[in-house]
Amino acid sequence: MHSQIDLVILGGGCAGLSLASRLSAFGKDAPSVLIIEQRENYTNDRTWCFWDIEHPAYKQQANHAWTSFEISNQQRTHQFDCRKHQYLMLESHTFYQDALTTIEQNPNVELLLGQQVISAPIKNENGWLIQTAQAQYAAKLIVDTRPPQKVNHQDAILWQSFVGYEIQTQADCFLPEKMVLMDFDDTFDDGLAFIYILPTSEKKALIEYTVFSEKILDKQPLITRLNQSIAQKMDGLSYDILRTEHGTLPMGNQLANPNKESTYLYAGLFAGAARPSSGYAFQRIQSWATVCAQSIIDTNTLYAFPKERWLQSFMDELFLTVIHNNPAIAASLFEDLFSQCDFQTVVKFMSDKATVSEHLQIIKSLPPLPFIKALPTFLIKKICAKIALSS
């Protein structure tokens, strides 16, 4: 068994690497940190996007920025100018390289690839014991960023399932300054589905097929839909697939994984990182990593993802409930949100930056009847959940 480590981070994904790199930046003052990650190496396997508002983390490293976008629903297309708050894309290989470079510069922080924890960590009088197939480690603190071993449909109000191709065409067919945020597919009847197009040159784009559904969808049906959508968009133009992305995100995560031990913290997508109404998580993870690292340095204590602000949480959950109950009008609700409300207000709302008055503007932009109908059942469910937690 190795000597006791100050902090073991389980999982070297976005949350784990973000926290480790923040701690590495403290130089010789950093605690001893071990990241245990089961993948053998890092590849360009995903993309994070966020709006340029209030100096977001990794703005300077962004691989591309868009100054306009559109939303399409049936025969209606809405155009938006977002030069004031550009839409930024960060490819995972850029993030991984930045984090790994920072970690490698600090001898107090070590990343172990190709190792998997084979049993639940054991608490003892000195901290925690973590067992992998290769070795046993002792730690004072644990931050666990891994997804739950078992996830059920009911663990979130909705699930965001997506698959995407980065494609290369032979002829120019994209506008690299303009992206498609949502192009809704009204032929899909098992949730809200839309195409998401992020062009990075005249010949290259990331195209994703995304579904908001009460079920976790398998990858293959999404690939079929994606292929059909690309064929329709390309209108016979040939293309090569450069890489593939696939994922499932909780929206309105109900799979609470609190650990009452102050020395063991759950973090990541299933611990408050993903914004319920959109699935955006990257900037929330960066904010948490900064505060958590400082807390470890200052007081040797772990900092959990902060609870959602009451009004924002209430609006997100009610919005998701209405989409869940009324999938046929879901596309029009998103259309109204962007077309009936000031764009800057929508961006601030989606980026967790909205004031109370801006929250009220969001409410005003949406049709009231579906929300009024959903409110009684929604409130009863919230009260029952609160009673269950307190008992």
Image: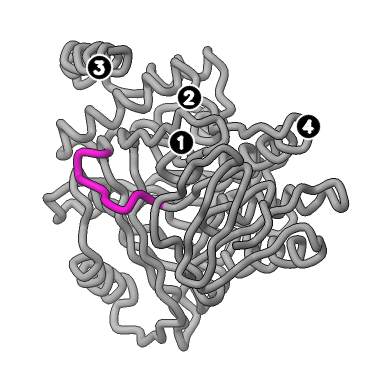
Tell me which label, 1 or 3, sits earlier in the chain: 1
Question: Can the viewer see residue 324?
Answer: yes
Q: CA distance from mark 2 to mark 3?
A: 19 Å
Residue 5 x, y percent position in the rendering: 67, 52
> Dot 1: what SS?
loop
Q: Residue at x 54, y 33 (%)?
A: 305
Q: Is residue 148 magenta?
A: yes
Q: Please name the residue that numbered disc 2 is placed on.
A: 308
> Dot 3: what SS?
helix
Q: Amino acid at mark 3?
A: Ala
Q: Residue furthest left?
A: 189
Front residue of this view, candidates 21 and 340:
21
Tell me which label, 4 or 2, sits earlier in the chain: 4
**Mark 1 Cα within 10 Å, few/some/many (few <14, many 20+)?**
many
Quadrant location of the N terminus?
A: bottom right
Q: Are marks 1 and 2 in contact (CB under 8 Å)?
A: yes
Q: CA distance from mark 4 to mark 1?
A: 23 Å
> Dot 4: what SS?
helix
Tell me which label, 1 or 2, sits earlier in the chain: 1
Judge from the rendering whether residue 220 lies leftward or rightward of residue 20; answer left or right.
left
Q: Residue at x 55, y 48 (%)?
A: 282
Q: Amino acid at mark 1?
A: Gly
Q: Which residues are magenta?
A: 147-155
Q: Which mark is residue 388?
A: 3
